Image (cartoon, coloured by chain):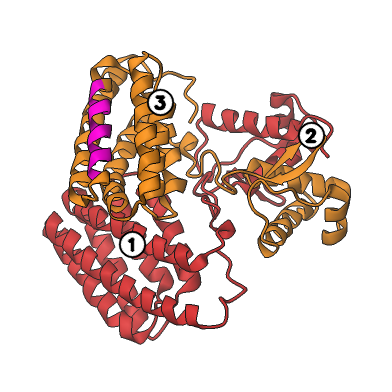
Chain colours: A red, B orange
Amino acid sequence: MQEKAPLSEITASKLISYIVDNGFEQGQKLPNEKILCDILGVGRSTMREAVRMLCSRNILTVKHGSGIYIADNTGISDDPFGFIFVKDKLKLVEDLVEFRLMIEPRVAALAASRAKNKDIMELERLAQICEDTILANENHNKADSDFHNKLCKLSGNIILPKLEPMIIKSISVFIDLSNADYTQETIESHRAIVAAIKNKDAIAASDAMIFHLMNNRNFILKRLTSLSEQPQMPSDVNI
Amino acid sequence: MQEKAPLSEITASKLISYIVDNGFEQGQKLPNEKILCDILGVGRSTMREAVRMLCSRNILTVKHGSGIYIADNTGISDDPFGFIFVKDKLKLVEDLVEFRLMIEPRVAALAASRAKNKDIMELERLAQICEDTILANENHNKADSDFHNKLCKLSGNIILPKLEPMIIKSISVFIDLSNADYTQETIESHRAIVAAIKNKDAIAASDAMIFHLMNNRNFILKRLTSLSEQPQMPSDVNI
């Protein structure tokens, strides 16, 4: 198959070291292709292939006519756990919901303990946007995700904001949570979570999150049951 | 920079769809390069580049002289969250440990509720291997990781076994846990966790895990403090 050693892969690894060693930040521009070729001692076609590899891993991004940049959310792929290769998608969604129930009550408690007032005001604003979106009868998936992602940031733990968006996105591929039966609960629970965090009350924040996610889970399990009773899962799912 | 459209990237996406649609399993061999070219309607050099991209994302693996195979742990990259790009590695380790404390007590509880006897015997065997390794004064990082990874599998949740190896590996890059002060605790805690799971006692399993991870955390924080008092972090760290 591939007879020669994968020089492009070696170059991709060297490029990662170059980025890390030189402390490039996300959004920052790299030197141009010719200079990179000189630095790493490879030809243009190898460099291009290495850059493409790193683009596909969300480490770099190429803006045509402009140059090579460090990607936003550097190195976090769209599907870091290979969910697309999990065959039983119903089980996957159930487990994603179970996983949220493991981490998010604790996230809310940490946010209540650690968040600064400025950030809490920002969280409140995101809850309000989510509420307004729901009341305008628009799809609030993004607003809901923004709220939960912000909470993860407020926890102060740097792992959680990397993990949460991918979990929420994966669930929302299967389940439309903008159902009217469920949105009123979302509004009330988000308010309760914000109130507890404002009061720096970690236990109340955790409890409010458990209540929210249990409602969320019950709703999702009901939807999954009706999905599994259909002849087959939608074939165009794309986590 | 890259003038032409990245045909290799489009081909890589198509190849993923082909793998998913045809239900290829990990370790399974794909049709040969020529057939893949015919199926996706591209030339050999494009296909080779696409295959290399998917190798770098741990979706495919090429065995020279044999063919293209679906990789083990399909699609899970070595560093799915881009930890290599996190500048403050001390904070990263602290947060990884905090993260373990969020999920593993619950993992132990789920394992106590759900694990089958055959799997519990296997867990006990892994605890014994870890213990034997420690008593032989050998590095028990791998044996310890095998024990915790098995616990994640016993939880029945399919997200956890994808996440745990990466967390443990990232911590072990920085901290050598084979210190004599700490290994006796590991032996006793692993025994307590196994005993609770054998008794199907979820609360005892969770408590034993909290105790184990708190000891683990205290040990790691002490080591981190001494590391941060050194002039600089080791420069050859490689998560």
- Which residue is identified by label 1? A148
Please provide percent x and percent y for residue A114: 20, 48
Residue range of the region highlighted in magenta in the rendering: B184-196
Marks 1 and 2 on same chain: no
Q: Nearer the viewer, mark 3 or mark 1?
A: 3
- Which residue is identified by label 2? B64
Report the Cα–Cα distance between label 1 and label 2. Answer: 46 Å
Residue at figure coordinates x 44%, y 28% from the top left: B142
- Left or right of residue B1, residue B131 in this image: left
Q: For mark 2, does the 10 Å Cα neighbourhood hold few (<14), some (14 to 19), or many (20 or more) residues? A: few
Q: B182 or B15: which is nearer to us?
A: B182
Q: Dot 1 lies on which element?
A: helix
Q: Earlier in the sequence, mark 2 or mark 3?
A: 2
> Cβ–Cβ below 8 Å for labels 1 and 2?
no
Q: Chain of mark 2?
A: B
Q: Chain of mark 1?
A: A
The amino acid type found where label 2 is placed reads His
Image mark for residue B141: 3
Q: Looking at the image, can residue B172 be seen?
A: no
Marks 2 and 3 on same chain: yes
Q: For mark 1, does the 10 Å Cα neighbourhood hold few (<14), some (14 to 19), or many (20 or more) residues? A: many
